[in-house]
């Protein structure tokens, strides 16, 4: 079992790939969440007609396979002469993709706050902004967090698709090693373990927060 | 003083208030009774500007609630409201529920706000529950907390919308006692209620709403003893 051709440098190569996976995911999730918050608030407060174009675009991001989006975006930016690196293109596409899902999570979570609770807040003299920051967001966070964690973990796995733009992230790195060393089982096991190690803290954090909130109910 | 002058209010095609006129003086307790859907809750939410009106006007201490120039967030400090449905902020403790508005709206320090909150929570019998989350409170305790939360803004007027109707019968008494106590202290109150004995014993005047119209208003003796309107008598015999 431990008789392997995998060297320390190969392991570093895999970890570097993991670093790329993590940074693409981080950009996508942070960017997607910021946009998702903005769009989600819009979707839940503005009349559906006014945000119809936005809703439509987000629906496109949710329904077209990510791989197609990545390749189309990469080709379009080249044609437009933007000279984005594949990494930048990947981050932008993944962030928009994430924002489309995040928008729905945010909208659903905001709409789960009972209207009478918000009325109570406003009737105490809180402004709309204070109602949002003091009441709506904290309450919505409890509703939306599990879905948001799920989204984040999903984006981390989906980020493997950026290998099609020539980026060497974790999955691509393991593919390269598999081809060279011909030890698919062992290498994929390690890659899987690294994915797990990246995901686990996020999943645990979510679980712990949920548990703490539940104790208050 | 709250002056309601010929107020009309519709939700879409449905006219819910059809020309309401009512003046409530300082220190007065007015109970509002009437059938379901007669517009009682809507009137309360119009008074503090949570709902717009279609015509007429509402003045609170001479300030027109629905005028464009009125700072509603400021006006609402004067008017406390407690709703029928439980509406505690579930992510905040009882104490935090009550200190939130004094701190954020009035800009009091945490310590000042907590002093006020403890005073009002003690007043409504929740001194033991300061650091408990609302989910752990009974319905009656939640409503009393909501009352303390409104009182902590030192309002001049309190609006109560059937605050006991979501409660188990054995919890109704404790909340009504709290309302009585407020009335005795001279708070100006408009109470929408289904508790006829409360309306009779506590209010200065009782208003009967029927299909968006204030069909009759008068002292409790008149409404409960010698109602002028057929509809009032019908309603009262149906709830007894
Ligand atoms: N936000 C709203 N949108 C549309 N219709 C509404 C809205 N709020 C209330 N209504 C309607 O207005 C009418 C009056 O409602 P309101 O809640 O004021 O009655 P109520 O006298 O308080 O009745 P209840 O005793 O059942 O509480 C009802 O027919 C109700 O369906
Ligand atoms: Mg009502």
Image (tube, coloured by chain):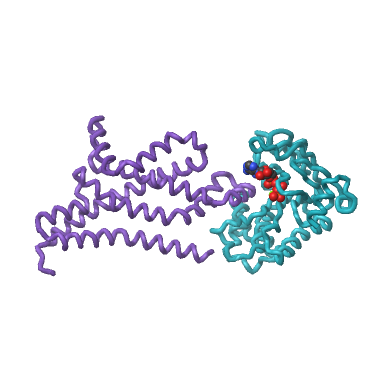
Pinpoint residue B33: horizontal percent, then vertical percent: 77, 50
Give the colour chain A carries in the figure. purple
- Taking depth in this image into account, of B70 and B218 the one nearest to the observer is B218
Q: Which chain is cyan?
A: B
Pinpoint residue B25: horizontal percent, then vertical percent: 81, 46
Left or right relative to B119: residue A142: left
- Taking depth in this image into account, of B209 and A102 the one nearest to the observer is B209
Q: Outermost residue toward the right?
A: B226
- Taking depth in this image into account, of A175 and A205 the one nearest to the observer is A175
Left or right relative to A210: residue B151: right
Instruction: Count the numbered circles shown.
Output: 0
Vertical comparison of B25 with A10: above or below: above
- Taking depth in this image into account, of B96 and B38 the one nearest to the observer is B38
Pinpoint residue A183: horizontal percent, then vertical percent: 12, 61
Query: Which quarter of the rendered picture does the N terminus of chain A lie within?
Result: bottom left
* Residue A84, image quadrant: top left
* Residue B134, image quadrant: bottom right
Left or right relative to A62: residue B132: right
At 21% from the left and 59% from the top, the residue drawn is: A191
* Residue B73 visible in the shown view: no
């Amino acid at each position: 079992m431990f008789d392997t051709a995998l060297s320390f440098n190969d392991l570093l190569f895999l970890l570097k790939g993991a670093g790329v996976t993590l940074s693409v995911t981080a950009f996508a999730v942070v960017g997607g969440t910021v946009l998702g918050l903005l769009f989600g608030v819009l979707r839940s407060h503005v009349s559906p007609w006014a945000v119809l174009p936005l809703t439509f675009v987000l629906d496109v991001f949710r329904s077209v396979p990510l791989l197609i989006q990545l390749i189309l975006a990469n080709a379009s930016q080249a044609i437009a002469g933007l000279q984005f690196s594949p990494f930048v293109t990947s981050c932008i596409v993944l962030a928009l993709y994430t924002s489309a899902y995040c928008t729905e999570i945010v909208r659903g979570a905001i709409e789960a706050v009972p209207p009478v609770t918000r009325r109570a807040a406003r009737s105490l003299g809180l402004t709309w902004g204070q109602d949002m920051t003091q009441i709506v967001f904290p309450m919505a966070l409890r509703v939306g967090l599990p879905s948001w964690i799920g989204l984040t973990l999903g984006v981390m796995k989906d980020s493997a698709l950026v290998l099609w733009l020539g980026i060497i992230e974790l999955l691509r790195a393991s593919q390269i090693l598999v081809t060279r060393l011909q030890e698919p089982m062992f290498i994929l096991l390690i890659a899987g373990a690294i994915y797990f190690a990246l995901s686990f803290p996020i999943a645990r954090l979510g679980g712990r927060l949920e548990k703490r909130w539940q104790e208050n109910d | 003083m709250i002056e309601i002058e010929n107020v009309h209010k519709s939700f879409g095609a449905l006219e819910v208030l059809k020309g309401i006129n009512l003046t409530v003086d300082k220190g007065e307790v007015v109970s509002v009774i009437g059938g379901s859907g007669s517009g009682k809750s809507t009137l309360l939410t119009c008074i503090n500007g949570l709902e717009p009106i279609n015509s007429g006007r509402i003045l609170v201490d001479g300030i027109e609630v629905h005028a464009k120039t009125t700072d509603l967030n400021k006006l609402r400090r004067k008017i406390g409201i407690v709703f029928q449905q439980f509406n505690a902020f579930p992510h905040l403790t009882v104490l935090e529920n009550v200190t939130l508005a004094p701190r954020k709206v009035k800009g009091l320090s945490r310590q000042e706000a907590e002093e006020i909150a403890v005073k009002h929570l003690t007043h409504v019998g929740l001194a033991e529950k300061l650091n408990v989350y609302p989910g752990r409170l009974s319905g009656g305790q939640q409503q009393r907390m909501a009352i303390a939360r409104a009182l902590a803004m030192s309002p001049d007027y309190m609006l109560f919308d059937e605050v006991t109707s979501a409660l188990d019968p054995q919890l109704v008494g404790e909340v009504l006692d709290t309302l009585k106590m407020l009335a005795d202290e001279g708070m100006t109150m408009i109470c929408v209620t289904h508790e006829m004995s409360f309306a009779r014993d506590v209010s200065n005047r009782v208003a009967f709403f029927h299909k968006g119209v204030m069909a009759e208003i008068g002292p409790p003796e008149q409404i409960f003893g010698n109602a002028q309107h057929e509809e009032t008598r019908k309603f009262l015999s149906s709830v007894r």
